[in-house]
Amino acid sequence: MYQMMVASRHFEDLIKPAYFEGKQPVFNMAKGPLPGEMHLSDGQEPCAVGVCAHLRPSDAVTATHRPHHIAIAKGVDLKAMTSEIFGRANGLSGGRGGHMHLFDPRVNFCCSGIIAEGMGPAVGAAMAAKLRGTDDVAVSFIGEGAANQGAFHETLNLAAVWKAPVVFVIEDNAYGISVAKRQATAIERNADRAMAYGMPGAFVPDNDPEEIFEVAGTAIERARQGGGPSLIEIETIRLEGHFMGDAEGYRPEGEKTSLQEKDPITRYRARLENAGAAAGDLDALEEEARSRVSEAFNHARHSASPKPDDAFTTVFA
C-alpha cells in the first residue's frame, strides 16, 4: 500500500509542471499539452490503496473527477492512462476522454466528471455479478458533496432493496469545490445515513490507511458473501486546490500548513519504520514506484497524437 501511495503522489508531482506548460505568464486553462481542468488527489491516497488492496481485476470500480489515485490502486494500465491524459492516440480511449474520463475494461475501472454519476453504474455492475452467480463486487468512490445528490439516496435505496454486492466509499476531504462540508451538509457524519437504508455504515477517521484496509475488507467480504451493500466514510485531506490554478481563497489562514503536516505518505512511512520496516527497503519501494511512473510519462510524451480523421471513428449516428 505504501508503494502504491508513493506511485500516486509521484504521478501527481509530474502532472503539475506538465499542466502549467504553455499556461504562463497569464493562466489559460485551454493552453498547453494538458488543456482543461485538472484535479489532483494529493493527500487522498490512503482511501484508494486501503480499499483496492482487496479487489480483483474482475471487481468493478467507479470513481470521481479526482481519479488518479484510485485508477493507479486498481491497476489501470499506467502507460495507457498517462497517454490518455496527454490526449495521445494510444491512450485508454484514444485520447478522447482526458483525465476525468478514464476507462480500462481490463480491470473494470471507470470515472466521470459528473457528481455521483458512478453510483448507479456501480450498482448495475454489482447486480450483473449477482445475476452471473459470481462473487465479484463493485465499489463506488464519491466525494462528501455527492452525498447530497439525489443519485446518492436513490442508489443506496435500490442497492439495499436488491442486496447488491456493492460498497460505497465517501472520500470526505471537507470541501465540495470551495464550499466547506459544515456549510452544506446537515449532519456531521454521512456514514450515519447508511442506517436509513438498512446497511452498515462505518467512519474511518484521520486518513488511516490500515484502518481503511480493515474496514474495507469487512465490507467487501460481506458483499462477496451475499450480505449486501455497505457505506464507508473516510476522513481524508486535499493537499491541493479543487483544480490546478485554484487560488484557494476559501481556506482559513494556516489550514494549508496544518494539512501539510498531516501528509499521509510521510506519516505512513514513519509508522512503518516504527513497526520495524527497514529504511533501505522503503527507499527501494519508492524508487521502483517513481521509476514506473516516470517511464509512463516518458512513454506518453513521445507517443503520437490522434490523426484528424480519428475524430470520425467510434462515433454513433
Image: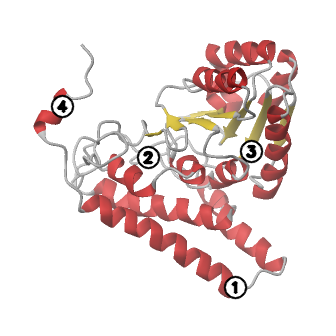
Closer to viewer: mark 1 or mark 3: 1
Q: How crowded is mark 1: few (under 14 residues within 10 Å), some or many (20 or more)?
A: few
Q: Is residue 180 above or below residue 50?
A: above
Closer to viewer: mark 1 or mark 2: 1
Amino acid type at image mark 4: Ala
Q: How is the image coloured?
A: secondary structure
**Residue at numbered disc 4:** 311
Amino acid type at image mark 3: Glu
**Residue at numbered disc 1:** 279
Return the mark for residue 247: 2
Residue situated in front as seen by the camera: 120 or 250 = 120
Amino acid type at image mark 1: Ala
- What is the quadrant of residue 163 in the picture? top right
Q: In this view, does 204 lie above or below 169?
A: below
Task: Say what secondary structure mark 4 lies in.
Answer: helix
Residue 168 lies, in percent from the top left, at 71, 31
Q: Is residue 287 above or below residue 213?
A: below
**Residue at numbered disc 3:** 235
Relative placement, left or right, of 221 versus 170 is right
